[in-house]
Image (cartoon, helix red, strand yellow):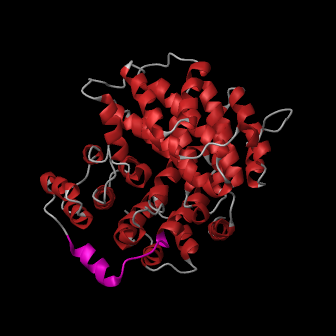
Amino acid sequence: MTADPRWQQELEAPTERFFEAFSAQLTQPDGVRDGVREAVKTLIPRIDWEAYLPHVPHGILGLRSVLRLRPLLSEKSFHRALATQLHMAAHEGRRSLQVLAQVSAAKGSGHWPNLEAFIQSRRPGLAYAEVQGFEGPEVADFQRLRRFTDEDMATVGHKAVMCDHLSDLQERLERPRATGRRLLGLAAWVAATPEDTFWARRAAKRLGDAAVTVPWTPATLDLAGWDLQVRDLCDLGLVALLDRFTARLKDGQGAVDTLATLVLAASEKQLDARRDLEGKTAWTYVYLATLARIRPTDPRIWCQAAALVNLFPTDEPEERVRAATIREPEAGALTDAVLDVEPALAMAHAGGLARAGRAEAALAALAEAAAQDDPTFNHAHQVLAVAAAADLLPDLPPSVQEAMLTALAKSLANSQGSGDLGRLADRALAADRP
């Protein structure tokens, strides 16, 4: 691994030369990979995770999303998005030097029984230290850890998402041992924080002793069938919703129909979101994308997802932004509409592209727009949501893809913030290019 000394220094104590150091790092062999490795290894012990509870900062979490979006972005946009995301992570609140010294020195024996005991007894510091004794974390370790979070929806599902995303980040960084211990350690730390199993217990009560599973079978419903369930998810209270939702799972409804229904409902909630709730509401896509990736069969997990979607407010249809009328949808015009804060126009281009069989083009246009927005403004919700859409897209029927991309276009257009950091990054990155 090759890390430029200037990059290492900026990670330890960031200054106004942060983007210059990152640009220098990119000139190294495997500059992106090694730069992110070094950032993860350096920053995870330094961030004051305790101070953020019951929330989770998104600097490290968003790195996976930026790397996931790389195939959809121009090289310039990718470097810009990565630079600003790393800047966000480097500027998260930090532990005191005394606490950092203690965390850095702590190292457990690397035994799973110890780690399980620390998670179950809610001792995150010891859970993190125990992982630092692991030889080299593998995908199976993240999967095993995730099982302790399956029924835990504290911080609206961040625990399962962290296990999934940090595992994927480890794979994208080609499994470095030291970095992997930090990533698995962070996932273990989050898993060991206070739990919330309220929704899982409510679901279990309704499921009773029935041997119910949710198989990953092809969709059997059409848009009308999904819409009936969307009304439950959007209009009912939690008690009535769980009654109907569990009944459908008991009747054998499969995961693809269930996922389609949840994404449609999440998209309606996104259309109803106030501007100050755009990013928080978009989090439902992130959690649903994790389910699409891990493919659970436990009905309680799907019930949690239904409760999460139901949590956000529903507005009257006539109060929603409506897509504008356009002649021809264009990907470039979609990006421009988002950046110009024109949600109705953005919705028209996103929906039009999806209906024309160009959902990937719409997704790429949204990714380009998200790369222009500084993640510190909205806690990286834009890149998290677009990466989640990229994960969800292959498992969704075309009509559901259209609904999701249209709602996401509205969300991004309504949550535009400052791009000042990105412009600083662009200048620094351009200075080191011929």
Is residue 332 visible in the rendered image? The answer is no
Say above or below: 259 vs 162: above
Q: Which of 308 and 29 is in front in this view?
A: 308
Location of residue 105 by image quarter: bottom left
Residue 65 in the image, given as x and y percentages of width and height: 50, 51
Residue 363 in the image, given as x and y percentages of width and height: 63, 40
Location of residue 295 by image quarter: top left
Q: Nearer the viewer, residue 299 or 241?
A: 241
Please state, as top left, top right, bottom left or bottom right, where the N terminus lies in the image.
bottom left
Segment tinted magenta in the rendering:
90-106
Seen at 83% across and 33% down, the residue is 328
Seen at 78% across and 54% down, the residue is 340
Using residue 236 as the reference point, say whether residue 404 is left or right of it. Answer: right
Quick check: is 428 in the magenta stretch?
no
Using residue 361 as the reference point, say whether residue 298 is left or right of it. Answer: left
Seen at 42% across and 30% down, the residue is 243
Residue 236 in the image, given as x and y percentages of width and height: 53, 35
